[in-house]
Image (spheres, coloured by chain):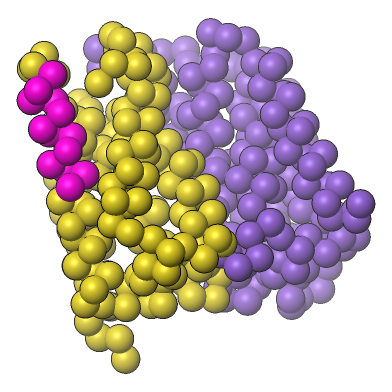
Chain colours: A purple, B yellow
Amino acid sequence: MTIERFMLIAGASLSLTSILYIPKAQLRKALLTFLSFQATTWFVSILLVQFNAISFPVREFTKATNVVFIPQFFIYPTCFTWFIFLFSQKNSIIYKILHWIISVSLPVWLAYFIAVYTDLSEFTKGSWLKNLGYLYFELTLQYLICFIYIKWFYRFNKAGEKQINVF
Amino acid sequence: MYFKERFIFAIVWMTCLISLWFIPKNKFREATFIFLFTQLPAWILGLAVVEADLIEYPVREFHKANGTNFSFEYFVLPFICIFFNLYYPNGKSHYKKLVYGISIIGIFTLVEYIAEKYTLILKYIHWEWYHTFLSMYIVIYLVRAVYKWFFKLKNPLSP
């Protein structure tokens, strides 16, 4: 088994297994966070490939798309889901900042190491520092957008009335 | 080049944008969930269909990145599902619900069939119109079931 295939299978099984650790009452929230991140990741990935910023030499659907599927569709969204789940409104501001930094760093360095050590993705241009900076920028923005969306979504209760204390 | 196809894409994007107006404001939250969820089965099915050489999309938006039609998976199908669910004849008879479902999926199938015949947006390779009908039926009712489960509506599995 090649390292690429191992990464895909391991990533997919880890993401799937992590579903078991989500409390049953929170399954809806988990699905929504997952979907919001999935849609944005997929959109950004297609744009990046189209404009030659990144390429994915080894992928599942070799004919149907030039974007690798499992990481963009399952692994990164799962990272974001766990970011939301481990986020707590009650903690201090320092804790929250640390939580943000660590959570964003996780997919950033994952994407970076995948690009450097495997053929799952390759940066087509730019130095390593530039690419890393770009990854931090892109994922922070994406986390922020999805975070705001989740907050907005759960500001309302079933009847459409505004609620406070979301997380 | 491909003036006709690009014109259709432009119309489709405009229609999606304008149709945002017709989503009731208090249902906007539900609409975003349907929009996001539809993409999960849509992309998996769409990619699998192209990978297996069943349908081909000669003219598409991101021709380098993606072999399927981006507007369709990202906007058209989610928007169809949004309006399908928000204007669903709840509380009416089973017969009316069935007519509602079949007519929407039927119109979609017909439009796709015409697009296949007269434009280069898509070409059926090993595919027939009833495959479209069947796959749309499955996707639309899957989305509806999950939508009902998500918002804790009654009987998620009944039509």
Task: Using the rendered image of the protein, determine whether residue B34 is visible from the camera's viewpoint.
Answer: no
Tally of numbered discs: 0
Instruction: Name the residue at 70% across, 53% down.
Output: A136
A97 and A103: which is toward the camera? A103
Image vertical order of residue A162 relative to residue B97, above or below:
above
Instruction: Give the quarter of the figure containing the N terminus of chain B.
Output: bottom left
- The answer to whether residue B102 is magenta is yes
Instruction: Name the residue at 9% across, 23% down.
Output: B95
Residue range of the region highlighted in magenta in the rendering: B94-106
Instruction: Name the residue at 55% across, 41% down.
Output: A37
Q: Residue furthest bottom?
A: B1
B84 and A142: which is toward the camera? B84
Residue B150 located left or right of residue A124: left
Q: Position of residue A111 (x, y in %)?
A: 77, 53
Residue A14 located left or right of residue A44: right
Image vertical order of residue A29 relative to residue B118, above or below:
above
Q: Position of residue A49 (x, y in %)?
A: 60, 70
B159 and A24: which is toward the camera? B159
- The answer to whether residue A101 is magenta is no
Examine the image and state in which quarter residue B33 appears.
Answer: top left
Which secondary structure class fits the magenta region best?
Answer: helix
Instruction: Name the residue at 43% across, 64% down.
Output: B126
Instruction: Give the quarter of the figure containing the C terminus of chain B.
Output: top left
Residue A128 located left or right of residue B72: right
Task: Using the rendered image of the protein, determine whether residue A57 is visible from the camera's viewpoint.
Answer: yes
B116 and A9: which is toward the camera? B116
Q: Position of residue B108 (x, y in %)?
A: 21, 52
Q: Position of residue B23 (x, y in %)?
A: 17, 38
